[in-house]
Amino acid sequence: MKKIVTAPHLKSPLCKSMKEATTLQDRIIGLMFSKTMETFDGLMITPCNSIHTFFMRYPIDVIFLDKNFIVVKIIRNLSPWRITWIYLRAVQVLELPANTIPDNLKINDKIEVLCTN
C-alpha cells in the first residue's frame, strides 16, 4: 500500500511514496548512510520530536508534526551533521528531499496521510 502526504491547500503532494519508521531500530537508523531516497520520497518517524543528520550524505527538509498532524516546525535544507532543537509539541517528523517543502506550507497547517493502492 502506497502512502501519500498532502495538505488540502497544496497543489501537489509533499510526497507520493512515504516510508514509516516506527520501531526503535528504524527510528535510530532513519536515513543514515543512505545515498539518496531512491525507493521513497518521504520518511515519517514516530514517535519523534528531535532529529540529527549524523552520517547522512545529503541535506533534507523536515516537518515536525503534533499528534493531529498539525505542523509545529518546518526546517528547510537541513545539512548533514546537524542536530535540531527538541520541539515539545511534536510527536512525529516527516523527512523529505531538500527543497521540496513549498513556501505556502506554514506552521499550524494540517497535513494528511492518504493510503492508495
Image (cartoon, helix red, strand yellow):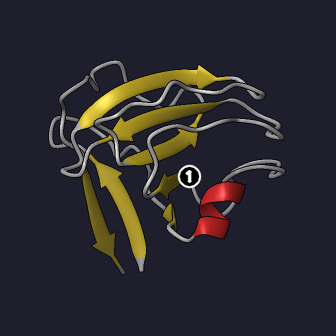
Residue at 28 percent across and 36 percent down: it is 89
The image position of residue 40, as x and y in percent, is 59, 60
Q: Is residue 97 left or right of residue 88?
A: right
* Residue at the spot 67% in from the left edge and 68% down from the top edge: 25
Q: Quadrant of the C terminus?
A: bottom left
* Residue situated in front as seen by the camera: 49 or 75: 49
Provide the residue designation for mark 1: 41
Give how far across and how far down residue 94 sits, in percent: 45, 46
Q: Nearer the viewer, residue 84 or 5?
A: 84
Relative height, residue 90 to residue 21 (above, below): above
Q: Residues within 10 Å of mark 1 (few under 14, many from 20)?
A: some
Instruction: For the N terminus, give its image quadrant.
Output: bottom left
Provide residue 16's location: percent of width, then percent of height. Answer: 44, 57
From the viewer's perspective, tell me whether residue 101 is left or right of residue 109.
right
Relative side of 56 to 53, left or right:
right
Question: Would you say 9 lies left or right of 89 here?
Answer: left
Q: Amino acid at mark 1?
A: Asp
